[in-house]
Image (cartoon, rainbow, N blue to C red):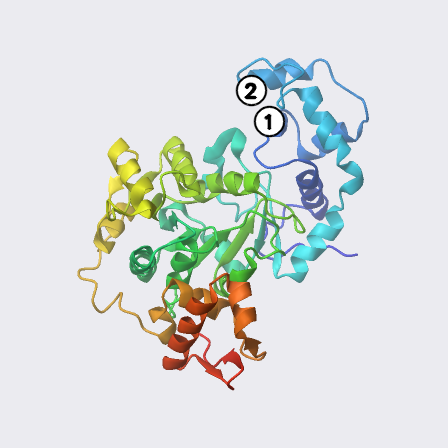
Amino acid sequence: MSINPNATQAPSRTSAERLTYAHLNQLIEPNDFTASALLQLMSASELLSLIRKEDFMPTDLKPKVEEILGFKTSSNMAQDLKVALTRWRKRMPLSNPLAAVDTAARHQGGLLIPGDDHWPVQLDDLNLGRPLCLWWRAGNPAFLGGQEIGRNVAIVGSRDASDYGDQVTFDLSRSLALQGYSIVSGGAYGIDASAHRAALTVEEWSAANPPTITVMAGGIDRLYPSGNSNLLNQIVARGVLFSEVPPGTTSARFRFLNRNRIIAALSRLVIVTEARHRSGALNTVSHAVELGRDVAAVPGSVFAPNSAGCHRLIGEGSAVLLTSPQDALALAGAQHPAQGTSEDSAPKRPTDQLGRDEGMVYDIMSFSKPMLVDEISARSGIPIIQTLKSLGRLEDLGLASTDGLSWRLLYQGK
């Protein structure tokens, strides 16, 4: 199995070094402060050699690690050096870095490691929480070189977004993208999908940075959620998809929480357009506040549970009030914020007019394979009545057709 370092990666970084990071990435879970502390004391290859030495525990290393961590560890703590080495060593038989790198290459991707020319340096603000490495997928790898914090704006919020939340998100995301900002989000249903979809409607993209960036909780070869696979494939084709876990890794709740810190660190501004009182989006905000990033929240109805989290952030002073695309552009540092929202932010294509349910139904349908209504409902997660209404709307817009039994798409937005 051959390894071909991608041309977008720094030529000074050898294949062996990249494989070392891929190996460590399969042994060490993200956000492991003990591993980060050790990498301040030794190289990646030295750390891998230490892990390979079964039952070996260097006595002089523990106090040095504790000094970097800032506290004393005990044998019942995950950060304890012996505990950490034990859990990493247990994974040795399961690690296959060659297969991981090969899988990434088959999916139009590769591996970025600290020190690469295209490593997003703003991630270093996470200190001990910095990702060990980043797996990526991109139809245009040149976009990896455009990861400037000043051009990245994160938009996050509820998975069960309302029509109001979808519309606000779409308007904000498109207005920012029209000014050349990359929209960063997590690829989930609801607000994430609306943000990505709006950024992709900007067809004439000439900036060095990508129109949108997705940070995945699982491996880059496992597009999740599956109902957003069409959208995520469009993001790969026109933007960038990142993950800090190796290919083949399944999504899990703790990985979603871990990846939120990367969304926050990549971006200069984090916008919450809709969120419940206890929402995962608020976890992203907490990371943003710790990192000193700007945070803004969109208000909603006092009777809407989906806006309770936004009102909480504004009331606590964790986020500034955001009421228009012009507010967002000003916070993002746009030189000449667009005046008015009628022409520039108006929908340009039929798919821009889709609501939440219609967009989810559209994203799981196929242009070549007819699908039954029951299958569309099951795969999209939309109840059968709403699915039928959404299909009717898609047919009215000329986006789908039916033979009386099954449905397929007629139009694919770019």
Residue 208: tell me if it is visible: no
Q: Dot 2 surroundings within 10 Å: few (below 14), some, or many (20 or more)?
A: some
- The answer to whether 86 appears left or right of 120 in the picture is right
Q: Position of residue 184 (x, y in %)?
A: 42, 51
- The answer to whether 302 appears left or right of 273 in the picture is left
Which residue is label 2 attached to?
A: 68
- The answer to whether 361 appears left or right of 274 in the picture is right
Q: CA distance from mark 2 to mark 1?
A: 8 Å
Tag shown at residue 40: 1
Q: Position of residue 37 (x, y in %)?
A: 59, 25
Do callouts 2 and 1 mark residues in contact (Cβ within 8 Å)?
A: yes
Residue at the image point whose x is 29% and y is 36% from the top? 312
Quarter of the image for residue 305 reads top left
In-front residue for pair 92/111: 92
Tag shown at residue 265: none
In-front residue for pair 168/391: 391
Residue at the image point whose x is 70% and y is 48% from the top? 15
Amino acid at pointer 1: Gln
Residue that extends furthest to the bottom in the rendered view of this protein: 403
Position of 174 relative to 351 (above/below):
above
Q: Can you say which quadrant of the picture contains the C terminus? A: bottom left
In-front residue for pair 412/381: 381
Q: Position of residue 169 (x, y in %)?
A: 33, 56
Amino acid at pointer 2: Ile
Which element type, helix, strand or loop, lies under badge 1?
Answer: helix
Residue that extends furthest to the front in the rendered view of this protein: 385
Quarter of the image for residue 1 reads bottom right
Position of 181 relative to 346 (above/below):
above
Q: For the residues carrying marks 2 and 1, which lies nearer the camera in this image?
A: 2
Quarter of the image for residue 116 reads top right
Residue 80: tell me if it is visible: yes
